Image (tube, helix red, strand yellow):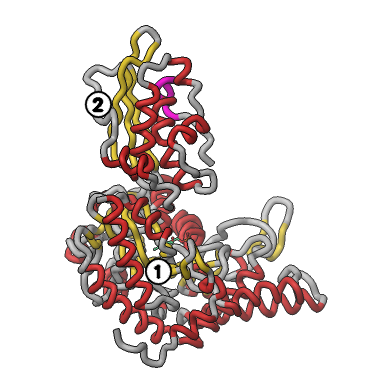
Amino acid sequence: MDDIYREQILEHARYPHNFGTLEQPTVSHEEYNPLCGDRVRIDLLIEDGVIADVRFSGKGCAISQASASMLTDEIKGMDVETAKAFSKDDLLTLIGIPLSKNPTRLKCALLSLKALKAGLYGVASVDVDDE
Amino acid sequence: MSILSQFDVLAIRREFPILQQEVNGKLVAFLDSAASSQKPRQVIDCLEDYYRRYNANVHRGVYKFSEEATFAYERARGKVARFIGATSPRELVFTRNATEAVNLVARAWGDANLRPGDRILLTLMEHHSNIVPWQMLAARVGASLDYLSLDGEGRLALEELDTKLTERTRLVAVAHQSNVLGTINPVAYLAERVHAVDAKLLVDGAQSVPHMPVNVQELGCDFLVFSGHKMCGPTGIGGLWARREILEAMPPFLGGGSMIKVVELDHSTYADVPARFEAGTPAIAEAIALGEAVDFLNRVGMASIRRHEVELLGYALERLAEVTGLTLYGPHTTEQRGAVFSFTLEGVHPHDVAAVLDSEGVAVRAGHHCTQPLHRLLDVPATTRASLYIYNTAEEIDRLVASLEKAKRLFA
Ligand SMILES: Cc1ncc(COP(=O)(O)O)c(C=O)c1O
């Protein structure tokens, strides 16, 4: 547990970056975790193939909120193709907490990545291998 | 709290090997028995004994192992049937779990007895396993669903029976005890009302059969379903009890071996009950071990188990009321209530609560507990749930409360 709730995670959960919505997003996608009822919506403003701005909204546990906060920091200014290739492992490295033996919490951490990818690919949902 | 009379919880704890384990450096406080209970040594030994000594298919061989396995399997049926007050072992069908038992009734009885325009009455506190099979049945036969709602304390709004129990209602399906609120529903009263309109009553006993004396004659229901793994038995085994005449009139559920009398090329005749509903090789070891679990529960005594839990329930309600920022769902008194506590903690997500508790060796569950309609009614996406059983102690409730205070500090 103390591995999971590092100060950085708690900080992002308390004061999430890029929290809110965009007035006219190019892409907006919401993912839902039926296991715990959590929702994360990601709004993207895409200009010239680059993610010019991003916001996320929704409710969830500290892990899902902190993960969304860090992910949105990371992809701001990133070109769309690079963002599309952003992987589960990239996200886990980014948030820096060990979840490989914690399948339930892994789903929480990956919720924002699912929302991002489904939004970018313009599909209803994507499989980011969270088993 | 007072010393538990005639109930030596420490002696009972010694019967459960898993409870001797440490989690994160602390003795585990297992507070998730509503999801699945732990198993006493004698149940674990019983499984091993079967595989070591007399493993063989049942109802098929004439050699010693098979005779012994068949005898033990049918003896277990008798034990489980007596445990719930059935008049005959023939009224008890072994299923995989409560969920399969509900599906069996929906398929076999429901398809044969419901017509377009008929109604099925459920309640807003039902587990998904007592909702989805009825939705599927309703879609197949063109029936519709009604739901009894709940009052602010999580009790059934019984006055709605006047309007929601209609001439077209064919079946009412209700949990004996809610797995989220702990509410114990007045089943005997419901049975009277349901039978007055000539409908049938199915009782979901998944949370009552493990925790209190349950007698189908006293309940007056027509069907009772339950799961072995929540009552000190193994996973993969559960039961359906149905009134003899209803069961005998029901067509089969799954087709295959064991459920037939004569198989011709284009049709078959079916076995008598309960074999008619037990197609294929059953969960033999698990059924026998469920019989062993029933022996264990009987030895402790279901009335004593209920008394122990009510005592802990009263203590837990007091202690949880002291936690500021905690919202407890369900009745706030011990009346007609089981020892299940679902709550939210202001400012901390239920998952985070459960993770902090885990770090203190306190095992609870977080989520919607397979009751999405109920959580929608409560207007929360998820709750944290602590649930007690035969082996829990007041000291574990103290640890729960102390860990909740830790969670509040961490996320403040
Ligand atoms: C009230 C209630 N009904 C039904 C079930 C379903 O039990 P099972 O999953 O063993 O079929 C449960 C347990 O999760 C329950 O708590």
Q: Residue at x 62, y 74 (%)?
A: B44
Compared with B110, B41 (above or below) is below
Q: Which mark is residue A21?
A: 2
In the rendered image, the vertical position of residue B25 relative to residue B337, given as above or below:
above
Q: Which residues are magenta?
A: A119-125
At label 2, counting other C-alpha atoms closer than 10 Å, the crowd grade (few under 14, some 14-19, many 20 or more) is some
Question: Is residue B393 depicted above or below B269 in this figure?
Answer: below
**Residue A124 among magenta residues:** yes
**Direction from residue A54 to residue A35 in the image, left or right:** right
How many numbered circles are shown?
Answer: 2
Q: Which residue is mark 1?
A: B207
Q: In this orientation, does residue B247 appear?
A: no
> Is B134 or B260 nearer to us in this picture?
B134
Asked if residue A77 is among those painted magenta in the image, a careful observer would answer: no
Side of A78 where A85 appears, left or right = right
**Image quadrant containing the N terminus of chain B:** bottom left
Query: Within 10 angstroms of label 1, few (less than 14), some, or many (20 or more) residues?
Result: many
Of tags 1 and 2, the one toward the viewer is: 2
Residue, x 32% and y 38% (percent of image)? Answer: A12
Q: Amino acid at mark 1?
A: Gln
Q: Secondary structure at mark 2?
A: loop
How far from the left and from the top, in percent, is residue A86?
A: 48, 24
